[in-house]
Image (cartoon, grey):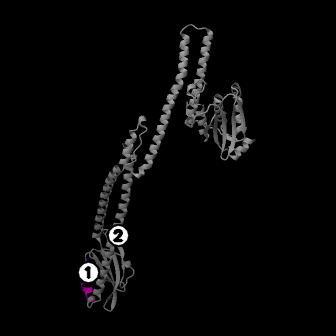
Amino acid sequence: MTAGLRHSLAVRVTAMFVLIVALAAAGLGTYLYRAFVAEIERRDDIGLLGKLRQVQILLGRPGAAELLHTRPDFFRDTMSGQENSLVRFIAPDGAVLADINAGGERYPVPPAAAIAPDRAAIAGWTSRRGDPGRVVAGIARLGTGTVTVVVARVYGERSAMFARYRQRIAGAAAVGLLAAALLAALLLHRGLRPLRVLAGHAASIRPGTLAQRLDAGDAPSELLPLIEALNAMLARLQEGYARLSGFSADLAHEFRTPVANLLGQSQVMLAQPRGAAEYEGLIASNIEELERLARMIESMLFLARAGQDEVLPARQALQALDEMTKVADFFEGMAEERGLRIECAGSAVVLADPALLRRALANLVSNAVRHADAGTTIALQADQRAGSTVLSVENTGVPIAPEHLPHLFDRFYRVDTARGNADGSTGLGLSIVGAIMALHGGTAAVQAEGTRARFTLDFPAARPESARHAAH
């Protein structure tokens, strides 16, 4: 459960929101506290300067000198808020004329005194009990001379007031954080509801309901890219699943025929005693079927590996005419048996894996030999174009209907289904050609016009330095 909470988006967003609120509350509380403290200190300093001014006025009145010697407390008692006030009178020669300090506090005397000091002249100090204090000195007339008046005050109640204010700020911040956390959790729960609905819709999709799509009608705009991406993924899954289902059905059909042939022939042969020649014929027929099955399995394995990017082509700069000539020489005997000629022409450099290129060309030439009319020519052509190298195999044969062209590179697809497996084809040759071209980043295509069919392999062009190397 702890791991689940740690990876919960709601918990993390709530924690971040609470952290932001906490930082904002701390900043605001600190600002308000400091502003409050500064205002109180300013008012206390103005009050302290006012007390000094009161004493200066009293000293300027007639008889003030006698009062200073006989009743010094009079000067403190006449001040407003005289509690915790301390007053000291100092003669020009430094002698203390009077010191009103019942508690015996020791406070500093400002080194400079003026007739009308401002806040900058006020100094801070700390009492014996640890309370903050402020002190200011000023010049006052006394008779025909002057004296220095030092007024100090201890602000014990201010410390307690500041402490209460801090507690209230902290309490308000704590309550605010709790409220923010609850509100954030509630808002996130409501805000993430579309995600829960989306998850429910996605969980309801099964292999049989891949055609279903996620509804984006009531979803917020922030989720629309995700819903569109998921719907696109479902479309790809549906297409892949349909292709896989079709491939499985085709595979079962393709295997059923040779297996049925093997079983039927073997059962018929075993139904009664046979001669050695008949058994040899059965074995030869079975071997032919097994070889076809082996070729089909090998082709299927190649397509599966190519589809999983497990086949990595070792690209080389090759002379296309040389590669086409090698393939043509291989099929020359088979072509002559059917009264066909194979011609190669063109000059181009192709960047391809040699073995895969020959396999693709061999599949196209084999297909052309099987379907070309007797007495015609199979033409292999290489063309160097801007940005690509195009190899083509063209033959004359039975016209191909336009509706078949988009499916010729599909697995197990045959234009003439009536011929079945009579020609020994596995139905995977053109699929392998398409897979090989996909591995090279190229394309395979077919054009049919009348009795002419032209298959093209479009490879990305070789780099100039690779082409020069191939020429040598």
Residue matched to label 1: 79
For the point 59% across and 14% down, the residue is 282
Q: Is residue 290 magenta?
A: no
Q: Which residues are magenta?
A: 65-82
Q: Earlier in the sequence, mark 1 or mark 2?
A: 2
Marks 1 and 2 sit apart, C-alpha to C-alpha, by 28 Å
Q: Secondary structure at mark 2?
A: helix
Q: Residue lying at the far right in this picture: please name it.
A: 472
Percent across and percent down for residue 408 are 57, 34
Q: Is residue 76 magenta?
A: yes
Front in this rendered view, residue 396 or 71? 396
Please say if 351 is above or below 296.
below
Percent across and percent down for residue 302 are 58, 32
Q: Residue lying at the far bottom in this picture: please name it.
A: 144
| Neighbours of disc 1 within 10 Å: few (<14), some (14-19), many (20+) | some
Q: Residue lying at the far front in this picture: please name it.
A: 450
Quadrant of the rendered structure where residue 356 is? Answer: top right
| Neighbours of disc 2 within 10 Å: few (<14), some (14-19), many (20+) | few
Please say if 53 is above or below 299.
below
Quadrant of the rendered structure where residue 297 is? Answer: top right
Front in this rendered view, residue 11 or 80? 11
Please say if 306 is above or below 79.
above
Q: Amino acid at mark 1?
A: Met
